[in-house]
Amino acid sequence: MPGFRPVLRLLPVGALLPLAACISFGADPPDTLLTLDATAQPQPGSAQTSNGARSIVVQVPATPAANASNRVPVRATDTTLAYVKEAQWSEPPARLFARLLSDTLTARADMVVLTPAQSFEDPSANLGGELRFFGVDAATREAVVTYDASLTRAGRTAVEKRRFEARVPVAAIDAAAAGPALNQAANTVAGEVAAWVR
């Protein structure tokens, strides 16, 4: 209607406070986040070229749903899973593991790790697979890393497959014990993969 002007009504700030107390943007993060650290890493300042060394593409491995989140699964029985309380990875473990594999292959297998885009112009090997389990086995009290690797060597079409597994005892099923033990198991697997690929 001509001359109609909407009237804006402002609520007092005090009226909004009860509403704010009801809104949550997610669970509080743990005090610390877990990550992986490669025991074999490229030396700072060292240069590589695919012209002078073999190259490889390391794919982020597929994972079952239990390892798709940032939490640390615990195999309670053969058919049941739980999660380590207050243990959370800084990013999905498959990405952390792929990065650790890349560092280990560079340091131990003397290979140049390329991205998939870079490999289009380079006859590279390709390493993929599935991270079948990356967590804790409650029955044996061990951190377990199980990786089913798939390797296509440079210039070949045949796919080689091999299962790698490492187990490290844990003193307790908590974040403080699980993180270092899983890091050690992951490095053991990465070292065996590097020896196989090399």
Image (cartoon, rainbow, N blue to C red):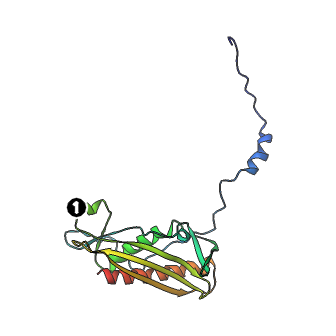
Q: Find the residue positioned furthest to the front.
A: 79
Which residue is under mark 1? Answer: 121
153 vs 52, nearest the viewer: 153
Q: Quadrant of the C terminus?
A: bottom left
**Residue shown at 50%/79% (left/top)?**
183
Residue 168: give x, y in percent of width and height: 52, 87
49 vs 131, nearest the viewer: 131
Residue 184 against residue 119 in the figure, above or below: below
**Residue shown at 66%/60% (left/top)?**
27
**Residue shown at 42%/77% (left/top)?**
148
Residue 92: give x, y in percent of width and height: 51, 66
Residue 166: give x, y in percent of width and height: 47, 85
Identity, as a three-letter code, of the amino acid under mark 1: Glu
**Residue shown at 32%/83% (left/top)?**
196
Toward which corner of the image does residue 57 lie, by quadrant? bottom left
Q: Secondary structure at mark 1?
A: helix
Toward which corner of the image does residue 119 lie, by quadrant? bottom left
Mark 1 crowdedness (10 Å alpha carbons): few <14, some 14-19, many ≥20: few
Q: Find the residue positioned furthest to the left.
A: 51
Residue 6: give x, y in percent of width and height: 71, 21
